[in-house]
Image: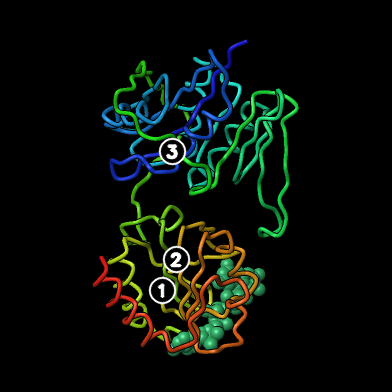
């Protein structure tokens, strides 16, 4: 029987997040002929984003547009998702493994008494079964899991499952669904934005991270310059955050963000196991450290033994020439 997969798309500052296109790519690897991929857009004044979702493989788009949904609120968003689920009865619901996705997915799963799997990095179709891979124990092992029943809920790790290539000629049916405000709901008075970088750390293709070796908040400046030239984001070790050189929103690692960029440049970071848990899945790791014995060199593809305050400006200069 034909099935429907629901992808809960995420928009920020009026733009769809890359992980939403990746979630559509994930959905496309789970379907057979006759199945439907439905994308769900929740927010305020977001209908214009629907065509982009169609271009990345959504056959149908449900838009729930309401001023109450401008900011993420768990009670409001879960109610909106439930309203969409009632309409289309999906077998599989896919979200990005973002702060919102991680909050919303278990709420959706609990409301449906469904199984839930977080942080999926790969999907295989083996005969009739869908097999999902996800890391455990801070990336030391991978487990492969299938669901015994439907519906089920997944979050996918950003930068791991490729999106389909964009095809602007693709069209999708757009359904505007009215939103029923739940009787009991929270009201957001203010949103405090801590991380200021234009590029989201967990979705960046290039991440330049600083550790305690940057020595001060100003020590991040050369890293920021290189990141802005390469269109990357700046991250940090907990050592740098604990020392007060930067905000905890930038922390990468076991108790921070998990990143899987194409290039990760670690500057003045020793390479503690807890830091590696957040970045060892990066495609190419470049380490800059003045200690040749620093453990970061064991996971690095390229290592530069030297002072970051000399090496990083030199790299910036060279990249500027090439780019
Ligand atoms: P350090 O270990 O002090 O290393 C600084 C490095 O900079 C050194 O290798 C030094 O040689 C180099 N250096 C100094 N000056 C220069 C220079 N001028 N040029 C080049 N190199 C220079 N850590 C995380 O990062 N993320 C986490 O999520 C995390 N979670 C944790 C959870 C728990 C439960 C615990 C116990 C710890 C956690 N930690 C985490 C902390 C982790 O164990 C390390 O203490 C931390 O990663 C060290 O940060 P660092 O590498 O910046 O500092």
Location of mark 1 (residue): 246
Location of mark 2 (residue): 250
Residue 42, given in percent of the width and then of the height, sits at 39, 31
| Ligand 1 picture quarter | bottom right
Q: Nearer the viewer, residue 179 or 269?
A: 269
Give the alpha-carbon distance from disc 1 to disc 3, as whole Å.
Answer: 29 Å
Tag 3 and tag 2, C-beta contact below 8 Å = no
**Which of disc 2 and disc 3 is earlier in sequence?**
3
Give the alpha-carbon distance from disc 3 to disc 2, as whole Å.
Answer: 22 Å
Residue 15, can we see it?
yes
Q: Nearer the viewer, residue 178 or 62?
A: 62
Residue 255, can we see it?
no
Is 107 situated left or right of 288 in this image? right
Residue 24, given in percent of the width and then of the height, sits at 47, 32
Q: Residue at x 30, y 57 (%)?
A: 198
Q: Quadrant of the N terminus?
A: top right
Residue 62: name its quadrant: top left
Location of mark 3 (residue): 20
Disc sitting over residue 317 in the figure: none
């Amino acid at each position: 029987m034909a099935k429907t997969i629901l992808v809960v798309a995420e928009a920020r500052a009026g733009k769809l997040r890359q992980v939403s296109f990746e979630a559509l790519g994930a959905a496309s690897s789970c379907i057979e002929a006759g199945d439907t991929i439905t994308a769900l857009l929740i927010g305020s004044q977001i209908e214009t984003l629907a065509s982009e979702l169609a271009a990345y493989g959504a056959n149908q788009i449900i838009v729930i547009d309401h001023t109450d949904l401008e900011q993420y609120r768990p009670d409001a968003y879960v109610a909106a998702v439930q309203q969409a689920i009632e309409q289309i009865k999906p077998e599989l619901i896919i979200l990005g493994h973002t702060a919102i996705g991680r909050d919303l997915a278990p709420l959706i799963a609990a409301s449906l008494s469904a199984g839930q799997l977080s942080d999926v990095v790969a999907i295989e179709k083996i005969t009739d079964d869908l097999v999902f891979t996800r890391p455990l124990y801070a990336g030391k092992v991978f487990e492969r899991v299938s669901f015994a029943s439907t519906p089920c809920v997944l979050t996918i790790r950003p930068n791991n499952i490729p999106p389909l290539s964009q095809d602007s000629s693709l069209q999708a049916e757009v359904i505007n669904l009215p939103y029923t405000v739940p009787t009991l709901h929270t009201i957001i008075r203010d949103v405090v934005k801590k991380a200021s970088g234009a590029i989201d750390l967990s979705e960046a293709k290039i991440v330049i991270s600083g550790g305690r070796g940057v020595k001060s908040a100003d020590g991040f400046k050369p890293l920021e310059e290189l990141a802005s030239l390469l269109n990357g984001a700046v991250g940090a070790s907990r050592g740098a955050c604990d020392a007060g050189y930067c905000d905890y929103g930038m922390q990468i690692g076991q108790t921070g963000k998990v990143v899987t960029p194409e290039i990760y440049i670690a500057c003045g970071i020793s390479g503690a196991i807890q830091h590696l848990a957040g970045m060892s899945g990066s495609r190419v790791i470049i380490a800059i450290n003045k200690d040749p014995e620093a453990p970061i060199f064991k996971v690095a593809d390229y290592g530069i033994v030297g002072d970051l305050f000399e090496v990083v400006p030199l790299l910036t200069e060279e990249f500027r020439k090439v780019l």
